[in-house]
């Protein structure tokens, strides 16, 4: 299929003949979606939290490695089932319960699409203002946001092949521009930057863990989307190669994270007003410390990065919306959701001033997504990686029955584990000045929401599978791993109208 040919596939299983992508394509799309200014902003948080450069680097590496390990198994569902991860979740949450994954990915995509457009638009306008004196009023920002949003929408309408083409260029170009930053900031960078926390400060560990969790949230944010891209990889591709591509795509984001961390330490030393935790302005600080010749690379990073993150977010949004509201084709759903997202971007930025709140919202959505990812991974392990692709499509074809029908289309085991884990995690969220859950202060100021959500989901889901075994038929020919099964009869797949007759 040509890159200029509009993709017609929705969430139905991609035919084997059209699954011509490889693990390296998955690497490029996943890395390209994170190789942006938005990731640099996340990389600045260790400095905002008062850590030294080396402490911040340690927190960054820890968060990246753990997050990449959690994310990597989510790449396997696409090649296996030829569809996105939300549809694959039918196997563990039920034919109807899979809407949880669609809803989570929908909210995450809109949030990250907004963040990418705002951060890239701000950098582009700020760089142009410093470079050629472009007025930095609301009109300039509005035009920049509109350009980004419309370009992203056009790419997403054309679909996966066009998005892959854009990311091929974006990965190389953005990486080169970040490397140029070594020459731009080498004279000002001091790796011995001490941070603002005194030795033995009781806030050190809350700050260190908080910084690591913010970094970890970036790989986790891709969990619901990974199948959108890996579904074009043939099922015969070795699983180790697919997982390695997903893992390395996140490890490679050390480049923008390091850029953000290093430049934030320079900003803290030379223009501290831009890293005030009460009102941080990383983009403004970056422009304040940049040499004049680096303004053009800053603008290019903004343009390229906005395109990469925006396309990976919005493409998945349209795909998931079409999977829930099956009357919409992928193109119709993409245009509809894209238009709503653009309206939200303008209203949120100029009318409601939601630019700070949306990052908090994104964090809370990721907190709810992490337990869903654990259930998917443990479900994969207990099923020995065996799935029935035809039974996964029951919801999309408006049918009833099949291996994953469970109780009227809902698998209360997976749903209960997710609800309890997500609810517990939200109660322990601690984002000072933004959102603190009812139990957020119990861990001495440390935000333990993500690890708690992961642990509760793992323990509760496995416990429910042992105490209340699933039907033997969902496990395939080799039977279950780690858990038991029950001889529960499976309803045949029938059309909805026929089942009501």
Image (cartoon, rainbow, N blue to C red):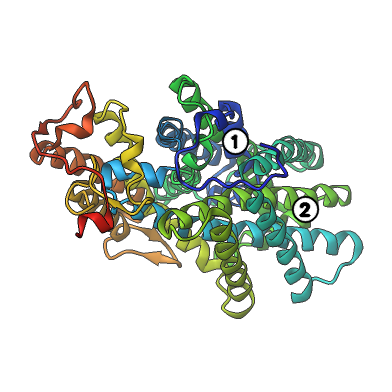
Helix, strand or loop at disc 1? helix
> Considering depth in this image, is 137 or 240 the residue closer to the camera?
240
Residue at left offset 77%, top offset 58%: 124
Q: Nearer the viewer, mark 1 or mark 2?
A: 1
- On the question of residue 447 being in view, the answer is no
**Location of residue 472 (image quadrant):** top left
Helix, strand or loop at disc 2? helix
Tell me the CA gap for discs 1 and 2: 22 Å
Residue at left offset 49%, top offset 49%: 198
Q: Position of residue 98 (x, y in %)?
A: 33, 50
- On the question of residue 157 being in view, the answer is yes
Q: Position of residue 32 (x, y in %)?
A: 64, 40
Which class describes the residues within 10 Å of circle 2: few (<14), some (14-19), or many (20+)? Answer: some
> Considering depth in this image, is 479 or 250 the residue closer to the camera?
479
> Which residue, given by chain and number where applicable, does mark 1 sit on?
254
* Looking at the image, residue 178 lies above or below residue 303: above
Residue at left offset 53%, top offset 34%: 232
> Considering depth in this image, is 303 or 501 the residue closer to the camera?
501
Nearer-N-terminus badge (1/2): 1
**Location of residue 122 (image quadrant):** bottom right
**Location of residue 165 (image quadrant):** top right
Indicate left or right for 186 with 443 as reference.
right
* Looking at the image, residue 422 lies above or below residue 67: below
Q: Position of residue 39 (x, y in %)?
A: 60, 47
> Which residue, given by chain and number where applicable, does mark 2 sit on?
289
Q: Position of residue 242 (x, y in %)?
A: 49, 26
Indicate left or right for 131 with 412 as reference.
right
In the picture, which quadrant includes the N terminus? top right
**Residue extending farthest right:** 132
């Amino acid at each position: 299929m040509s890159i200029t040919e509009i993709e017609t596939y929705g969430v139905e299983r991609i035919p084997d003949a059209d699954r011509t992508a490889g693990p390296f394509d998955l690497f490029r799309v996943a890395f390209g979606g994170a190789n942006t200014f938005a990731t640099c902003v996340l990389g600045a948080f260790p400095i905002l939290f008062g850590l030294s450069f080396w402490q911040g680097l340690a927190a960054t590496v820890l968060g990246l490695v753990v997050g990449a390990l959690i994310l990597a198994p989510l790449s396997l569902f696409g090649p296996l089932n030829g569809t996105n991860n939300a549809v694959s979740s039918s196997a563990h949450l039920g034919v109807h319960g899979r809407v949880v994954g669609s809803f989570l990915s929908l909210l995450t995509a809109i949030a990250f699409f907004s963040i990418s457009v705002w951060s890239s638009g701000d950098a582009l306008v700020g760089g142009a203002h410093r470079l050629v004196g472009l007025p930095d009023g609301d009109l300039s920002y509005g035009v920049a946001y509109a350009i980004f949003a419309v370009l992203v929408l056009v790419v997403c309408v054309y679909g996966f092949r066009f998005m892959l083409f854009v990311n091929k260029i974006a990965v190389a170009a953005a990486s080169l521009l970040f490397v140029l930053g070594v020459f731009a900031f080498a004279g000002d960078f001091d790796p011995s930057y001490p941070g603002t926390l005194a030795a033995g400060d009781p806030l050190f560990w809350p700050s260190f863990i908080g910084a690591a969790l913010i970094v970890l949230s970036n790989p986790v944010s891709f969990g619901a989307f990974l199948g959108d891209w890996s579904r074009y990889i043939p099922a015969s591709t070795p699983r180790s190669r697919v997982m390695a591509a997903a893992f390395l795509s996140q490890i490679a984001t050390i480049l923008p994270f390091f850029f953000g961390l290093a430049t934030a330490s320079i900003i803290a030393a030379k223009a501290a007003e831009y890293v005030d935790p009460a009102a941080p302005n990383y983009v403004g600080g970056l422009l304040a410390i940049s040499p004049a010749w680096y303004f053009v690379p800053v603008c290019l990073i903004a343009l390229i990065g906005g395109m990469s993150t925006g396309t990976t977010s919005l493409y998945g949004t349209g795909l998931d919306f079409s999977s829930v509201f099956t009357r919409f084709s992928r193109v119709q759903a993409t245009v509809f959701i894209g238009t709503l997202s653009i309206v939200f971007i303008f209203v949120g930025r100029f009318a409601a001033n939601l630019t700070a709140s949306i990052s908090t919202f994104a964090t809370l959505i990721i907190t709810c997504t992490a337990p869903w990812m654990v259930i998917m991974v443990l479900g994969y392990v207990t099923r020995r990686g065996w799935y029935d692709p035809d039974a996964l499509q029951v919801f999309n074809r408006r049918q009833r029955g099949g291996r994953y029908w469970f109780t009227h289309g809902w698998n209360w085991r997976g749903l209960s584990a997710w609800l309890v884990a997500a609810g517990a995690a939200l109660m322990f969220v601690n984002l000072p000045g933004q959102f603190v859950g009812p139990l957020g202060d119990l861990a001495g100021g440390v935000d333990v929401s993500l690890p708690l959500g992961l642990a509760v989901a793992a323990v509760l889901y496995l416990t429910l599978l042992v105490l209340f075994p699933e039907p033997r038929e969902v496990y395939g020919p080799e039977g279950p791993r780690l858990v038991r099964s029950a001889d529960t009869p499976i309803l045949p797949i029938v059309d909805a109208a026929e089942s009501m007759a």
